[in-house]
Image: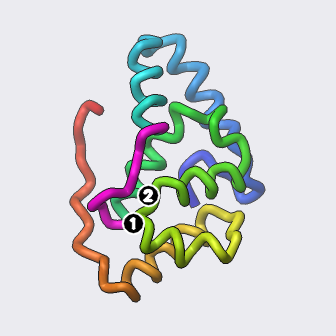
Amino acid sequence: MAAGVTATGGRWIFGFNQYLGKKYIGELYLEDRKQEFLLLKQGDLSVVDYEREYMRLSKYAVELVPTEEENCKRFLCGMRDEIRIQSVALKIKEFVDLSKRAKMVEQYLGLSKKSEPSRVTGK
């Protein structure tokens, strides 16, 4: 389960972080991250790397994915076609389940590649 997301799907900590962010991080930075989230596509990333980047950026756009179901829809929209087609019909509404399914599909289709090591940057 992602940090800050409770078992009931609550996202209160993200909201709190967003409040603190607006207070201590520039509005332009926050808007840039939100735009980056809106434009995020899996492309050549593995599902693991796409999920990691999605989760990193989603905390800047909490209002765009207020529910677990909306979060799943947006995550699906950014997936590669081959993986999305195999996953969308299941109508999965839990992010953890959707992520697991996408990883299985990626592996089954032979699309998986080594995950990039997690970046430690100032981004």
Q: In this view, does 117 lie above or below 58?
A: below
The image position of residue 101, as x and y in percent, is: 54, 77
Q: In this view, does 85 lie above or below 16?
A: below
How many neighbours does mark 1 have within 10 angstroms: few (below 14), some (14-19), or many (20 or more)?
many
Q: Is residue 54 above or below residue 98?
A: above
How many neighbours does mark 2 have within 10 angstroms: few (below 14), some (14-19), or many (20 or more)?
some
Q: Please tell me the numbered disc located at residue 47.
A: 1
Magenta-colored segment: predominant secondary structure: loop
Q: Dot 2 corresponds to which residue?
A: 51
Picture residue at 57% right of the left edge, 25% below the top? 18
Picture residue at 61% right of the left edge, 62% below the top? 95
- Magenta segment, which residues? 38-47
Q: Quadrant of residue 43?
A: bottom left
Query: CB atoms at circles 2 and 1 under 8 Å apart?
Result: yes
Distance in Å between CA atoms under marks 2 and 1: 6 Å
Q: Is mark 2 on a helix, strand or loop?
A: helix
Image quarter hosting the C terminus: top left
For this orientation, the residue located farthest to the right is 8
